[in-house]
Amino acid sequence: MITIMHLSDLHFGTESAQVLSSLIRQVRELSPEVVVISGDLTQRAKWREFRAAKRFVEEIDKTDTEVIVVPGNHDIPLFNPVMRMFSPFHRYRSVFGSTRVAVQHVGRVRFITVNSVRRERHASGFITSRRRNEVARVAQECAEGDVNVVVTHHPLGINSLSDKGDAHHGDSETCRAWHGAGVNLILSGHVHRPFLLDATEQLIANTGEGEPPMWILNAGTAISKRVRHDHPNSYNLVKIDERAGFDGIAVERWDYRVEGRQFFQQATRSVELRSVPSGSIGK
Ligand SMILES: [Fe+2]
């Protein structure tokens, strides 16, 4: 079993200390193979916020859990136009390294990271055709039966019209390219709303009968006080069973409850990776 803890939108600078310590306890208890953080580690891309995010990642590192990180739109400066124009990722790269398309293997799961943040866009995301094609090329190198998981900040699909301005531009084209290349699952965040969508139903027209699904799993904000849409702090757990031949995944959503001072499992759903079901675990 490979367990992925999917976190997003930590927004250090606006974090709740209580939720943060509960999350660190959960990482130690669950001991997932991987923690994925799908962007917006900081609130305003300040050095002290990056240092706090780094300390959190180092806490996870102590548990022998792999950590996979991509930047979000809050991880480039908003109020420093010179830095935003000429070196928007300087601080992010100093702390977390390259923002190029990269692949990281954890067992037979391949994580492909891609940066969807553009300095010229305030909040929405965009994946350039070069990056789209690079992800597709890497995905096609996947061995038979292995699982391709793309990690990016902006969701390629939404489950609420109120998030329309915050999604990707060119999402259906990107979805088609990645689905054709064999991507199974995309992990994202940004809108502070957890949901699970089958991109083949929502975004890709003319998908043939029996085509495999491509799931978009979005995470809410894990620890920020900036909760939205009545969604509490939350994270996702994805469980992939190697013994079952990677044919399906179990997805759990864990919500933070103030009265219990910890995260509780709120919803669970099992979905296939090789055939076509439908639905959502979002509210
Ligand atoms: Fe964001």
Image: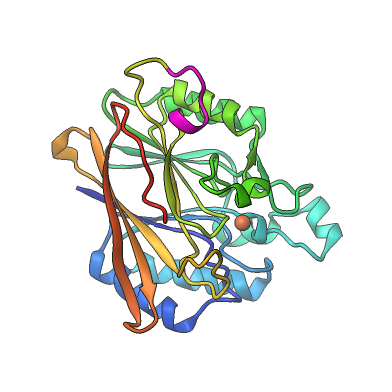
Is 68 in front, or is 124?
124
Relative side of 13 to 239, left or right: right
Horizontal and vertical percent for residue 45? 67, 66
Quarter of the figure with residue 63: bottom left
* Colour setup of the view: rainbow
Quarter of the figure with residue 173: top right
Q: How would you classify the magenta stretch by its main secondary structure?
A: loop
Q: Tell me what residue is drawn at x 31 percent, y 68 percent.
A: 27
Horizontal and vertical percent for residue 282? 41, 53
Relative side of 52 to 195, left or right: right
Q: Quadrant of the C terminus?
A: bottom left
Is residue 145 visible in the rendered structure shown here?
yes
Reply above or below: 169 against 143: below
Q: Quadrant of ligand 1?
A: bottom right
Answer whether residue 79 is magenta in the image. Answer: no
Is 220 in front, or is 84?
220
Q: Tell me what residue is drawn at x 81 percent, y 51 percent.
A: 86
Q: Tell me what residue is drawn at x 68 percent, y 71 percent.
A: 46
> Which residue, as the protein is rendered here, is positioned at the far left?
243
Horizontal and vertical percent for residue 32? 28, 58
Please give the count of numbered marks on the rendered protein.
0
Q: Which residues are magenta?
A: 201-207
Is residue 63 visible in the rendered structure shown here?
no
Answer whether residue 202 is magenta in the image. Answer: yes
Reply above or below: 168 against 264: above
Q: Tell me what residue is drawn at x 48 percent, y 17 percent.
A: 206
Horizontal and vertical percent for residue 40? 58, 60
Quarter of the figure with residue 19: bottom left
